[in-house]
Image (cartoon, rainbow, N blue to C red):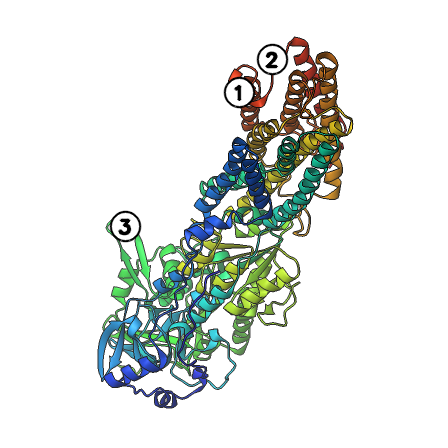
Amino acid sequence: MVTVERSRFPKLTAIWHAKEVAEILAELNSTKVGLSRSAVRENTAKYGKNILDEAQPRSGIIIFLGYFWSIPVALLTLAAILSIATGSKVDALVIMGVVLINAILGYVTESKSERIILSLKNLINPTAWVIRDGDTVEVDSQTIVVGDVLVFKPGSYISADARVIESDKPNGMASQRLSIDESALTGESVPILKTCQTLIDKDIPLAERINMVYGGTFVTGGQGSGVVVATGRQTEMGRIQALVTETKIPQTPLEIQLEKAGSQLVLLSSAVCILVLALGIVRGYGFIEMLQTSIALAVAAVPEGLPTVATITLALGINKMRQQGVLVRRLDAIEALGSVQTICLDKTGTLTANEMSAIEIQTSTKQIKLNNNKPTSNSDEELLRLIEVAVLCNESKVERTSDGELIITGSPTENALVQMAVDAGLDIATLRTLYPLVEINHRANDRNYMATVHQFNKSHKLIAVKGNPGEVLSLCQHKLQDDLLLPLDETDRQVIALTNQDMTSNALRVLGIAYAEIDATTEVNLNNLTWLGLVGITNPIRQGVKELIADFHQAGIDTVMLTGDQQNTAQAIARELNLSSEQPCKGELSFAPTNNVFARVTPGDKLKIVQTFQAEGKVVAMTGDGINDAPALKAAEVGIAMGKTGTDIARGVADIVLANDNLETAIAAVSQGRTIYNNIKKALHFLLATNLSEIIVMVAANLLGMGLPLNAIQLLWLNLVTDIFPGLALGLEAPEPNVLNVPPRSPDRAIIESSDFKRLGFEAGVISLFTLAAYSYGIANYGIGDMPNGMASQRASTIAFMSLVTAQLLHTFSCRSDLPYWTAKLQPNRYLTLALAISLGLQFICLIIPSLGSLLKITAIDGIDFVVIAIAAIVPLIINEVTKKVSC
């Protein structure tokens, strides 16, 4: 957990948007012409610099040592220490080698995952323009202090939170309103026009404080100035950073289940160790030899190969997802995604493309859906006039690169109108040359429309107007219909109003378009316009998202949409995506976790929503791309960020980054995650069944007075040969056909349930029974020896050893599916074939290489012995397969 230093500076908690500018300037010891040098020093000392507290990531050594901090690893370490104490150094090296491999793999994957909050500072420009002593100067953004007067320029980031002083500065022959892109902070998809007017409502949401600007947001148009009211950690971005810092990363379901299973196995192994040691002492066997055997058996009870199998399986899964454009930053995140029950989807930039697009035109005579039918230059006069006016009453710039690529620069809404005209085949440059701009009047507090005046044929002027449909309609006295100028009556107005209502109910941002032609000498009058029609603009849903939502539902995953937009917009998008037809819930503490659409949410709300679902026992994934998503991204079991459009902070806290912003790859990651969990469960099933068979063989033989079939080094060899390679091969099984057609598992569901233990006991019992039978054959034919240390003769022990190893290796086939092998319809697993070939090869090499055979205390066997070993290995596989349930 990272920590940050508490600020020693006083908190600025005033409700700045509800205060008059003069009052704020006086309170902060500032003026409209900026701070004096002495005031800068005083405010720096009082409020501090504009620096976000930086949190140091965990050191590499801490990450590395963290992989040794678990009960199973502690048990294995203790076993290694005891092995050294009793002179079994080889045993100790084998045990600790497995532990070390697991730690190294985990460290390599997670060494960079704690470098999170430092990325916030990349969102602030290194310099900013301020007014000091009446002069506009460029300063280091870190030296900005409370009371400074910032100068806002198009294309620049804002360096601190400020109250707007001026939002309508001269720009050429007209003026342009200040507009700010706040989507990274609030989730609003449309730039916000700013004003210097004081707001009356003190409790107004952050997204509606139109006289405030915030650090990390972007100036899309206009110019202006504002007095800084918060810097550093006291800015809205600083508060989000604090939320990220204080948010803990939850354990994944697999971590929880493996930890639980490990604890249970520790108790089992301890009991086995004590039991075998006690039985050996009672029977008069040597204490040191029995202690070594008991330790080896205790280690055998714990599948020490499991951490390695789990880690490597996850790492290989991560590599596979990387090939599909999914970058996994935390080892267990992909597995956690496979168990997700609820996925919270940020709308702006995730579900939608965060760019505006005109999709519908409604004139007096026709309706055109632009996604199906693009207007052309052959369209009627009424439609073409509407498109031309929309382009003329527009400040977006259109340029072509040397290779012919069209670049449109401006606000998203106006860009959408220009793109509409380009799609219709209009030559924008020629049109604007024919109608040069003379005058421009932007939207203002008392008028929600924009009007431009253009020269035409020297003797005429054209007035172009676009904006709020109701306000534009009130300025119109005529309509253009069938190339005729007709009066606009009350019925027409009602039809237009109803059409506008229908379009807005579909989450469209609707603009009314009107125009007038006047003599060049006539005074401009906006109360005698001609109505042209309506244009519906939307923030389009990303391609494939609707199908993706259906895939999530098919996989049993609940989908939840979070947005800073208005409720009607959220509701319409939810309907289109088949999320919900119910009224969206506002992002407040009173919401119910059964809701799946939340509108007007703040960054804190998103965090609380995720945590509330978690409190209901859900495994939660969160998608996002902005600063406002960061706390929720970190709090969720799986945070998914956009790679291209995402901010540094979103990518920094996320567990998974979609390199191409393709949310569709998330469902592939779900499939991969579920497959990884299933495969780890198969590997665990195999390891527990085979290890349990070792325990049964050792304890049963001891109880029956048959001596100890296996020695300590043989038990460790068993785990080394039969655990690692076959376990890894099971971890690489292909996805099952129905992996996305079943609900996600409950996080409370144990990875090995009581019914699984019954099956494990049966399978282990069958393997043990035939191993003991082969061992009995060996004793009957080759004697039991003097057994001075409780050991049988070498040949009988060799037969038992070879029978048990071979049976365990063949048991991997049975662990591939819960169904009988001939009905499971499994894909070939070449890794399993290779693993068995390697393991069986190593096993039988022991009979050929004298030094290795001497180490393991095994001896040569004849053809009949091989037949007995084959029967003892193959028959248990057949029995275990035919006793499986026909259906799952």
Q: Which corner quadrant of the image does residue 862 belong to?
A: top right
Mark 1: which secondary structure? Answer: helix
Q: Quadrant of the C terminus?
A: top right
Q: Are marks 2 and 3 in contact (CB under 8 Å)?
A: no
Residue 662 % position (x, y): 47, 49
Q: Label 1 sits on what residue type?
A: Leu
Residue pointed to by mark 2: 860
Mark 3: which secondary structure? Answer: loop
Comes first in the chain, label 1 or label 3:
3
Q: Is residue 121 visible?
A: yes
Vertical placement of 264 versus 779: above or below? below
Residue 394 % position (x, y): 34, 68
Residue 67 % position (x, y): 51, 47
- Which of 163/447 is in front? 163
Comes first in the chain, label 2 or label 3:
3
Q: CA distance from mark 2 to mark 3?
A: 80 Å
Residue that sits furthest to the top in the current view:
863
Comes first in the chain, label 1 or label 2:
1
Residue pointed to by mark 1: 852
> Which disc, if any, is residue 434?
none
